[in-house]
Amino acid sequence: MTRRTTIYDIAKELGITAASVSRALNNNPKISESTRKLVMETAAKMNYKQNKLALALRSGKSFNVGVIVPRIDSNFFASVIRGIEEELNEHQYNVIICQSHENEKREGESINTLLNAQVDGILMSVSNVNSDNSNLLKRIIEKNVPLIFFDRKKNIEGVSSVTINDFDVSYEATVHLIKQGCSRIAHFMGNQTLEIFENRFKGYKKALEDNGIAFNQDYVIQTKSVLEDGKRAVDELFSLESPPDAIFSSSDFTALGAIKQLKMKGIKVPKDFCVVGFGDEPFTKFMELSMTSVDQAPLEMGKMAAKVFLEQINNKDNIKIEKKVVLKSQLLIRDSSSRNIIL
Amino acid sequence: MTRRTTIYDIAKELGITAASVSRALNNNPKISESTRKLVMETAAKMNYKQNKLALALRSGKSFNVGVIVPRIDSNFFASVIRGIEEELNEHQYNVIICQSHENEKREGESINTLLNAQVDGILMSVSNVNSDNSNLLKRIIEKNVPLIFFDRKKNIEGVSSVTINDFDVSYEATVHLIKQGCSRIAHFMGNQTLEIFENRFKGYKKALEDNGIAFNQDYVIQTKSVLEDGKRAVDELFSLESPPDAIFSSSDFTALGAIKQLKMKGIKVPKDFCVVGFGDEPFTKFMELSMTSVDQAPLEMGKMAAKVFLEQINNKDNIKIEKKVVLKSQLLIRDSSSRNIIL
């Protein structure tokens, strides 16, 4: 049997002290990023296996981080989680995931579950801002467990968040529809207790205003992010005396439902009707008529949320850090709203 | 402040003893299923909140169950997890999820993570049967933590599993293609160290044999469950002297890649070429030409895996139970292989 590689072997290889190797392996902020990387690479090359349990006992950490998302079966949340994992795995943290199914009770259970599992931090996208879970969120903070919101956040003092520029990109999407010649633009609006959906609605409204188009409340339909709601919303819009000629949807799923229902009604997209979704779900590219959508930079969002967590957990001075990161997102113009394309 | 509901209140309401209520709430097998349901419903109606921590201390359980899947962003695994959650939440268990990304090292880390989080059981779909994680799996069993495989399993004595009838449904899918007039049927074959993919391949091969069609090794392409592999495989097949006229794919993702590549090549599906996928991913229905696929009964699989877990955890007599559940799956015939449909 070959002897296990120790931190002393790595220290010898690199000509630094074993203490430095240990600090680097434990993400001690006193060690420079370049040294840490060098130690990590050498450790991997020498097949060094850190004794996690010993590490956990010594540091009082579990090296597990909890992530709570409304659902795992959306490409957006799955990609955010992938970003979190990529960043945290590199720093020897493991990620455990809970889904809340947009259900407050389950969200609360998930928080308890993760706290009982002794996670070192919780990264979450909330299900509903008006929910009753404020006490549980406070419990996280009181326990000194770093809490970071991504995408769907609550405004709680001292809690960091990573979001995208929902207002700006929604404004841009609406202006794009106006430039395509649309003037009766409807909006599929998400849960307004969530800032992201509020900002998408506000961006849409402001773009109309700035372009001299009167806002029409009848064109704003409240939808959940499911196909059926998109279908229902189209039926509702076409029962109006003057139906719209475009939709800016706050979700790809409702936009897909809408396109299917428009097709059923024999309405030609994009010739007679333009549709823009939100989220850049893979199916937006697979469709026979590809769908214009918004890339929410999920991988970057996950990595950034993980970085904010690492900053907080390694903040030995216990200084309160509150960080609001707003990432840039991108409007991806495709067939469903491109009238200049010959079909 | 209103007084909290206690088990005595529930007992009084139902005219049974508090001990019976407690046993029902704790899933004691001595309590009949009907009584348990009644107690649960009454407890919910009376807004009874069980003190989980007290329960955990008393029972020595965490009431957390870990699930490990290769990936969360496939509809199949997301649906299995949903099934597990639906069943376990009802019995007051919470589910925490880890993804292995088909990576043995990450799978091992996930097992450690879940064991350190003190889960009461692990339900998993393995990434690779030849992996080095056998010792870790043994550690689960030695710790007396129930381990249940679903979909992708290893054959380990004493470990239960829930799978589908992969052989039968693959046989059926291949016969379906033969009946559509196809005689040069290719197969996109998954990782043969996994029984599910082995059985899909065997079902395909047997159907050819039974129908007097010679097996052609050139028509069998090893693929991972990603679009790119489907595209690559089509290119490979069409570089053959006698290319195939149909594909039975062990994955929807590779089948989708294949259809896109066939389209690129100007080959008409299903007129000149038939395609059958596997997994019933939602996009199979969204496509302009809907894709024939196999419904793997994921929700049922999840519920069944959870039931097997509950059986084991509530097995106070410590009898070794090994259960092999094989669920029936269903071939869903759609446009991509239906030549009798007028297009």
Image: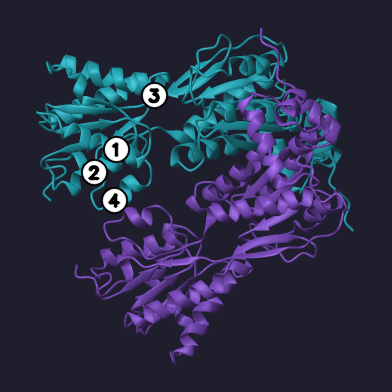
Chain colours: A cyan, B purple
Q: Position of residue B324 (x, y in %)?
A: 69, 65
Subunit ID for the residue under disc 1:
A
Residue B117 x, y percent position in the rendering = 75, 36
| Amino acid type, mark 3 | Asn
Q: Is residue A335 visible?
A: no
Residue indicated by mark 3? A191
The answer for which chain carries disc 4 is: A
Give the CA distance from mark 3 to mark 1: 14 Å
Question: In the drawing, does residue B6 fall left or right of residue A252?
Answer: right
Q: Which label's residue is closer to the chain start, 1 or 4?
A: 1
Does the image show residue A20? yes
Distance between mark 1 and mark 4 Cα atoms: 16 Å
Residue drawn 38% across and 20% down?
A192
**Disc assigned to residue A287:** 4
State the residue position of label 2. A259
Which amino acid, by three-letter code, is at mark 4?
Met
Q: Is residue A124 left or right of residue B27?
A: left
Closer-to-camera residue (A37/B315): B315
Is disc 2 in contact with disc 1, using a CB cutoff of under 8 Å? yes
Measure how far apart labels 2 and 1 are at the Cα level: 8 Å
Q: Earlier in the sequence, mark 3 or mark 1?
A: 3
* SS assignment at label 1: helix
Q: Are marks 2 and 4 in contact (CB under 8 Å)?
A: yes
